[in-house]
Image: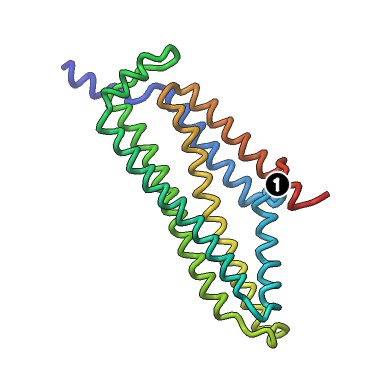
């Protein structure tokens, strides 16, 4: 009877579930506001999308396009770095599952920490691993898309045909594909940022809420109130 009662106990407390709902809701709401709302069009990511199309227009007018292929290679290298980092993070997260008792003893000794059962710790760890898996798929797909961008760059019509409708349609396709690749890269980085906030849950649900709010504020500031945005947009 005692074992049956333990099985019926909820895995997490109501406060834990509220904190997790705040985390997921903040992630989804921020993504929607940044990528799909009119307000998001003022953000740094949206401003850079405009420069992607300007880049393609300049590329069409250049006879030698070596610099463009080098830029795509640099973008691919950034995706490869973060994709490999995601794999390392996944491995490190899964390693935590083998040291549950030791980690729980350390966290339980903290004055502000809340004691976790082994099942709760493993569930939280698996959640963190899922976040990094999501990030890996985003970075890996972005890497692949930039590979497609490189192929389309090679298929760009010569400079003599830059005023034709076919050439303009082609650079519109390349610019659109480059924008999509950048969007997936941004989503992967966003997963990394929210993973930092998720770490607070291992200490306390209150810390998860506070860390999530801090992550949202930092990302919002970088998109809409940072020096880098002012440098891109100008006065």
**Residue appearing at x 36%, y 43% in the figure:** 90
Judge by depth and name the residue closer to the eye, 163 or 35: 163
Whole-percent x and y of residue 102? Answer: 28, 23
Q: From the top left corner, tell me how far across and down residue 194 is, in percent.
A: 50, 38
Residue extending furthest bottom?
160
- Mark 1 lies on residue: 228
Helix, strand or loop at mark 1: helix
- The residue located at (58%, 30%) in the rendering is 214
Q: Compared with residue 14, is residue 186 higher up or lower down, i.e. above or below?
A: below
Which residue sits furthest right? Answer: 235
Horizontal and vertical percent position of residue 172? 64, 72
Front position in the image: 77 or 198 = 77
In this figure, which colouring scheme has been used for the structure?
rainbow
Say which quadrant the N terminus sits in: top left
Outermost residue toward the left? 1
- Find residue 91 and report its image quarter: top left
Left or right of 87 on screen, residue 221? right
Instruction: Judge by depth and name the residue closer to the eye, 110 or 122.
Output: 110
Task: Locate residue 155, reporting x and y percent.
Answer: 55, 80
Residue 10 is left or right of residue 187, and the answer is left
* Residue at point 36%, 25% (across, down): 12
> Considering only vertical position in the picture, is 140 above or below 27?
below
Which quarter of the figure has residue 14? top left
> Residue 101, relative to residue 198: is it above or below?
above
Q: Does 37 sit left or right of 112 as displayed? A: right
- Number of marks in picture: 1
Q: Residues within 10 Å of mark 1 (few under 14, many from 20)?
A: few
- Residue that extends furthest to the top in the rendered view of this protein: 111
Front residue (pair 121, 231): 231
């Amino acid at each position: 009877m005692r074992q049956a009662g333990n099985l019926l106990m909820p895995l997490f407390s109501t406060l834990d579930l509220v904190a997790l709902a705040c985390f997921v809701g903040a992630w989804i709401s921020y993504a929607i506001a940044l990528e799909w709302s009119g307000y998001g069009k003022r953000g740094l990511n949206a401003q850079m999308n405009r420069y992607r199309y300007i880049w393609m227009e300049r590329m069409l007018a250049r006879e030698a396009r070596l610099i463009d292929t080098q830029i795509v290679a640099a973008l691919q290298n950034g995706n490869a770095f973060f994709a490999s980092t995601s794999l390392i993070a996944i491995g490190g997260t899964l390693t935590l599952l083998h040291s549950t008792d030791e980690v729980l003893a350390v966290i339980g000794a903290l004055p502000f920490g809340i004691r976790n059962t082994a099942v709760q710790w493993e569930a939280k760890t698996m959640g963190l691993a899922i976040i990094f898996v999501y990030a890996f798929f985003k970075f890996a797909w972005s890497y692949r898309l930039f590979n497609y961008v490189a192929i389309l760059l090679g298929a760009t019509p010569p400079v003599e045909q830059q005023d034709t409708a076919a050439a303009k349609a082609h650079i519109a396709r390349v610019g659109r594909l480059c924008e999509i690749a950048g969007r997936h890269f941004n989503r992967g980085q966003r997963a990394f940022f929210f993973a930092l906030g998720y770490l607070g849950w291992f200490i306390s649900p209150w810390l998860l809420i506070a860390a999530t709010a801090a992550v949202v504020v930092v990302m919002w500031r970088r998109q809409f109130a940072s020096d880098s945005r002012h440098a891109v947009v100008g006065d």
